Amino acid sequence: MKADIKLAISKEIGKRVAELRKEKGFSQEKLGFLIDSNRQFIYKVENGLFCPTIATLYFIAQALECDLECLLSIKRV
């Protein structure tokens, strides 16, 4: 049960990251570079394959010029 919830949360956050990244006109590669990571990492985050830490989400939010709250504002899963 907890694993299902964690996966659902990861997917929702990933969708939000992808949305905001596309709005900024950034490629996955560029966002990865901005947070000192790579395209593969961003792909995994956006597709819910990896649940990033709060610190990583903070860096993603900074790169996307939004508040951390913006990435975490998801509907109840």
Image: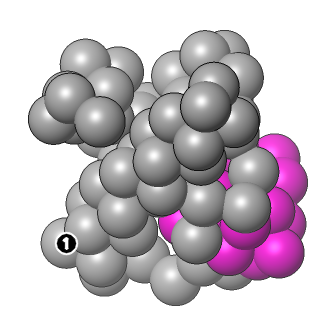
Q: Is residue 34 magenta?
A: yes
Amino acid type at mark 1: Glu
User: In which quadrant is the N terminus drawn?
Assistant: top right
Relative to 14, does residue 70 appear above or below in the rendering? above
Q: Main secondary structure of the magenta part?
A: helix
Judged from the image, the secondary structure of the residue bearing numbered disc 1 is: helix
- Total marks in image: 1
For residue 44, side relative to residue 23 (left or right): right
Q: Which residue is mark 1?
A: 23
Q: Residue at x 37, y 51 (%)?
A: 12
- Viewer-side residue, 3 vs 56: 3
Pointer 1 local density, CA inside 10 Å: few below 14, some 14–19, many at least 20:
few
Relative to 15, does residue 35 appear above or below in the rendering? above
Measured as percent of width and height from the top left, residue 56 is found at 67, 29
User: In which quadrant is the C terminus drawn?
Assistant: top left
Q: Which corner quadrant of the image does residue 65 belong to?
A: top left
Span of residues in magenta = 32-46
Q: Residue at x 68, y 74 (%)?
A: 43
Q: Which corner quadrant of the image does residue 75 belong to?
A: top left
For residue 24, side relative to residue 61 (left or right): left
